[in-house]
């Protein structure tokens, strides 16, 4: 599964459940769903746990293994369509902004130091000229 956001992954899981139920004539197992979507069993369990939490699917454990049932497919539309990468992108953007702010502050401090140095040399030059004029 190449998609990385939960909204698209949730749709894929429900679609896989529907297709497997149609093909096999029974609710699919967790392993069958994971194999169909080419995901690890751990990732499949994680996705299913999230879908159970929002009430989209139901997992029933019986004598023939764990079976997946669609409970309410409309719950998928309540999932925000933003990906988790957006949060990561926001964090990176904030970090870059803070780095820019630090760079600007360093540049202003350097400019200030340069100005102080220039004023100091001008003042020293002025005093030296004044002393030379007295002699």
Image (cartoon, rainbow, N blue to C red):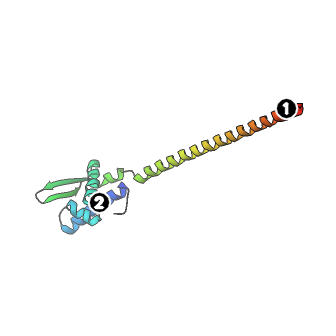
Q: Say which residue appears at 32% left-offset and 61% top-offset.
A: 12
Name the residue beneath numbered marker 1: 131
Q: Is residue 128 left or right of residue 102?
A: right
Q: Quadrant of the C terminus?
A: top right
Q: Residue furthest top?
A: 134
Marks 2 and 1, how far apart at CA: 88 Å
Q: Say which residue appears at 74% left-offset and 40% top-offset.
A: 118
Q: Nearer the viewer, mark 2 or mark 1?
A: 1
Picture coordinates of residue 126, whole percent (x, y): 82, 35
Picture coordinates of residue 112, whole percent (x, y): 68, 39
Q: Is residue 28 left or right of residue 10?
A: left
Picture coordinates of residue 14, whole percent (x, y): 28, 59
Callout 2 crowding tier (Cα within 10 Å): few <14, some 14–19, many ≥20 = many
The residue lying toward the viewer, choosing from 135 and 120, is: 135
Picture coordinates of residue 42, whole percent (x, y): 26, 57
The residue lying toward the viewer, choosing from 59 and 120, is: 120
Which label is found at residue 76?
none
Residue 121, image quadrant: top right
Circles 2, 1 touching at the beta carbon (< 8 Å)? no
Q: Residue furthest left?
A: 63
Q: Say which residue appears at 57% left-offset and 47% top-offset.
A: 100
Q: Say which residue appears at 27% left-offset and 58% top-offset.
A: 44
Q: Quadrant of the N terminus?
A: bottom left
Looking at the rendered structure, the secondary structure element under dot 1 is helix
Q: Earlier in the sequence, mark 2 or mark 1?
A: 2
Name the residue beneath numbered marker 2: 13
Callout 1 crowding tier (Cα within 10 Å): few <14, some 14–19, many ≥20 = few
Looking at the rendered structure, the secondary structure element under dot 2 is helix
Residue 19, image quadrant: bottom left
Q: Is residue 5 visible?
A: yes
Q: Is residue 81 visible?
A: no
Q: Residue furthest bottom?
A: 23
């Amino acid at each position: 599964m190449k998609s990385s956001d939960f909204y698209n992954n949730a749709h894929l899981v429900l679609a896989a459940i529907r297709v497997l139920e149609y093909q096999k004539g029974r609710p699919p197992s967790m392993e069958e769903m994971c194999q169909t979507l080419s995901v690890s069993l751990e990732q499949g369990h994680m996705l299913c746990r999230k879908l159970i939490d929002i009430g989209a699917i139901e997992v029933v454990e019986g004598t023939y293994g764990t079976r997946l049932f669609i409970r309410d497919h409309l719950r998928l539309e309540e999932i925000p369509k933003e990906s988790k990468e957006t949060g990561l992108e926001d964090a990176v953007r904030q970090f870059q902004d803070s780095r820019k702010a630090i760079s600007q502050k360093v540049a202003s401090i350097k400019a200030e130091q340069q100005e102080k140095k220039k004023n100091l040399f001008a003042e020293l030059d002025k005093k030296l000229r004044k002393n030379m004029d007295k002699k």
